[in-house]
């Protein structure tokens, strides 16, 4: 999995990365624009205006257990927030979502056609070295490919998208040139190999699965790993003086694990220097009262959703899933979640694109439209009859568990709203609150839920960033398809979209894939998630970054 695939975030309202623009560019339209900002707001400032040194206190929902972002248990956005400081991000997106090679790691990366096959040649910056002194080389690309191509089940991967299309990774003119040959075209090749991990650690299944468990044995970034303090629930990275690029402005970054509902208070008290407000009206209001604080907004590529576990119980039936989608009033949920945020609250009707992205189109065909009569009819057709307060079938009550993380107000609010909506059509929904630090590992990843809600975080890549969410599960290999639902037809459609090298065709095929996802009714988008950050005024080059990748070495405080 790469940065272009899904990441789980446990800040504010929980999130995962997905979505993208077909040509790597975000473009707002008059019809679907989101107010306040369509690009980003990080208060971009030249390095010479910054004070050298200082400590940044960065809030996260939890300290990830596994820092291999490509491993099934390592795809937390809280983890990637740390990994981007210490590991190679070989491709970077700007504010428009345009992706180019990161010169700190690559002098070039070019795709060409050789004997009818797509070939990408990566030329590695000769100055780039791992913290153990080993130079970055083609072997790191080869090790990543072998781990992520899906051929060896011992590697517990999050996604094989793109890697399964690679036929070989070979040494080029020297060790600092990797030649990657694809068996079939892959339009989003720039999404691969980032973060890059060292072959000497991830070259074996055990190293891949456990090498970055609770630690960073080898790094290669502007910062290096110092340690984790379990008592204070902090993780610290410090400036790496062996870094060959622009030296980091900050001395250190301290990541502090905080309950989502406590983060706004921590910001107000000066315990952290910024936080992601997300869809949190209470946090937004509290941040407005903090002296010396900015509220930085952007139309981010992120969205809130409800995931249906179609692998068990009543939700195995597509009609039951479609009935629930008709029973939920997404407009009411959006308005309630976003009340007081000065944000356009409306349902999102696409699984690949958000409203301000080129390619956005409503493919729902009425499936996500609030219609209680339709919901009741679908449940009748599925054999769930209304006899009393709740529907029954074969002597069993139509009862579902909505699993949410504790101390996340957005999730709690959604539960309170959804419960009576489902009751109105005869479905009993139990709200099951679980410890935040166990939410993904023990519940979502294991399928121990019927319904759940969090957010997907978008990237500049359309289908390849999202394919692992909807790809048909094969045995125990679900990648990130927590719904357990998929089809060969959808896989073929997504494969076609991912193979497109023509941006316009990629958009068309992504929307064709989206139509199939709506029909299988396994994940319901709610609304585009606000990209809102509360930030100390003197803290710059950070904030609502939208599609842009942050350069951690440039983050700092004004003189």
Image (cartoon, rainbow, N blue to C red):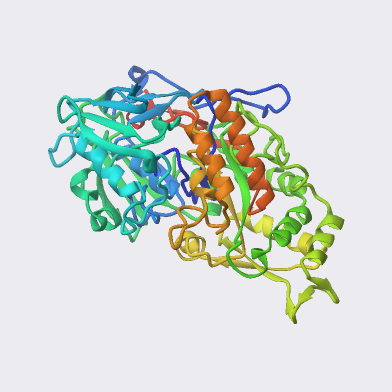
Q: Is residue 417 above or below residue 334?
A: below
| Residue drawn at (53%, 33%) of the image | 20
Q: Which residue is nearer to you in this view: 305 or 37?
A: 305
Q: Is residue 116 above or below residue 418?
A: above
User: In this view, which residue lies farthest toward the bottom?
Assistant: 395
**Residue 424 seen in the figure:** yes
Quadrant of the drawing holding the N terminus: top left
Q: How many marks?
A: 0
Q: Which residue is nearer to you in this view: 180 or 322?
A: 180
In the rendered image, residue 56, in percent from the top left (x then y), is placed at: 37, 38
531 lies left or right of 120? right
In the rendered image, residue 61, in percent from the top left (x then y), is placed at: 46, 52
**Residue 534 seen in the figure:** no
172 lies left or right of 379? left
User: In this view, which residue lies farthest toward the front?
Assistant: 115
Q: Quadrant of residue 247?
A: top left
Quadrant of the drawing holding the C terminus: top left
In the rendered image, residue 86, in percent from the top left (x then y), is placed at: 29, 39
| Residue drawn at (47%, 33%) of the image | 499
106 lies left or right of 200? right
């Amino acid at each position: 999995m790469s940065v272009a695939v899904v990441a789980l975030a446990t800040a504010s309202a929980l999130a995962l990365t997905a979505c993208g623009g077909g040509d790597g560019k975000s473009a707002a339209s008059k019809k679907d624009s989101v107010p306040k900002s369509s690009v980003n707001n990080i208060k971009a400032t030249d390095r010479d205006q910054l004070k050298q040194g200082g400590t940044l206190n960065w809030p996260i929902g939890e300290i990830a257990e596994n820092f291999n972002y490509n491993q099934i248990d390592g795809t937390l956005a809280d983890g990637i927030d740390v990994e981007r400081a210490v590991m190679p991000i070989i491709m970077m997106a700007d504010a428009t979502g345009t992706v180019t090679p990161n010169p700190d790691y690559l002098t070039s990366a070019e795709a060409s056609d050789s004997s009818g096959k797509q070939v990408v040649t990566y030329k590695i910056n000769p100055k780039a070295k791992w913290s153990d002194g080993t130079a970055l080389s083609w072997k790191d690309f080869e090790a990543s490919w072998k781990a992520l191509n899906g051929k060896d089940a011992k590697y517990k991967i999050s996604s094989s998208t793109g890697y399964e299309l690679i036929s070989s990774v070979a040494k080029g003119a020297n060790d600092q040139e990797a030649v990657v040959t694809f068996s079939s075209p892959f339009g989003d090749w720039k999404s691969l190999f980032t973060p890059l991990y060292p072959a000497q650690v991830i070259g074996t299944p055990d190293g891949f699965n456990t090498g970055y468990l609770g630690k960073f044995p080898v790094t290669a970034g502007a910062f290096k790993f110092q340690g984790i303090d379990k008592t204070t629930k902090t993780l610290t990275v410090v400036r790496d003086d062996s870094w060959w690029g622009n030296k980091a402005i900050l001395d250190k970054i301290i990541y502090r694990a905080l309950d989502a509902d406590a983060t706004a208070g921590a910001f107000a008290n000066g315990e952290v220097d910024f936080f992601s407000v997300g869809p949190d009206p209470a946090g937004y209001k509290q941040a407005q009262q903090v002296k010396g604080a900015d509220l930085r907004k952007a139309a981010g590529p992120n969205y809130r959703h409800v995931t249906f576990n179609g692998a068990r119980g009543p939700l195995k039936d597509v009609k039951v899933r479609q009935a629930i989608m008709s029973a939920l009033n997404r407009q009411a949920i959006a308005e309630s979640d976003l009340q007081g945020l000065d944000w356009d609250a409306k349902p999102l009707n696409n699984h690949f694109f958000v409203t301000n992205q080129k390619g956005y189109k409503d493919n729902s065909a009425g499936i996500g439209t609030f219609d209680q009569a339709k919901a009741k009819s679908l449940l009748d057709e599925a054999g769930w009859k209304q006899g009393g307060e709740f529907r029954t079938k074969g002597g069993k009550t139509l009862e579902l568990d909505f699993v949410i993380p504790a101390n996340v107000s957005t999730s709690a609010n959604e539960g309170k709203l959804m419960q009576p909506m489902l009751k109105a059509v005869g479905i009993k929904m139990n709200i099951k609150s679980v410890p935040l630090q166990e939410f993904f590992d023990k519940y979502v990843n294991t399928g121990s839920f019927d319904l759940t809600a969090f957010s997907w975080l978008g990237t500049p890549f359309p289908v390849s960033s999202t394919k692992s969410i909807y790809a048909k599960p094969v045995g125990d290999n679900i990648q990130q398809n927590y719904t357990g639902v998929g089809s060969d037809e959808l896989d073929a459609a997504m494969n076609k979209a991912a193979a497109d090298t023509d941006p316009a065709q990629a958009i068309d095929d992504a929307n064709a894939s989206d139509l199939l996802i709506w029909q299988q009714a396994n994940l319901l988008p709610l609304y585009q998630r606000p990209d809102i950050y509360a930030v100390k005024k003197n803290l710059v080059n950070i904030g609502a970054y939208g599609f842009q990748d942050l350069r951690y070495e440039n983050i700092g405080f004004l003189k």
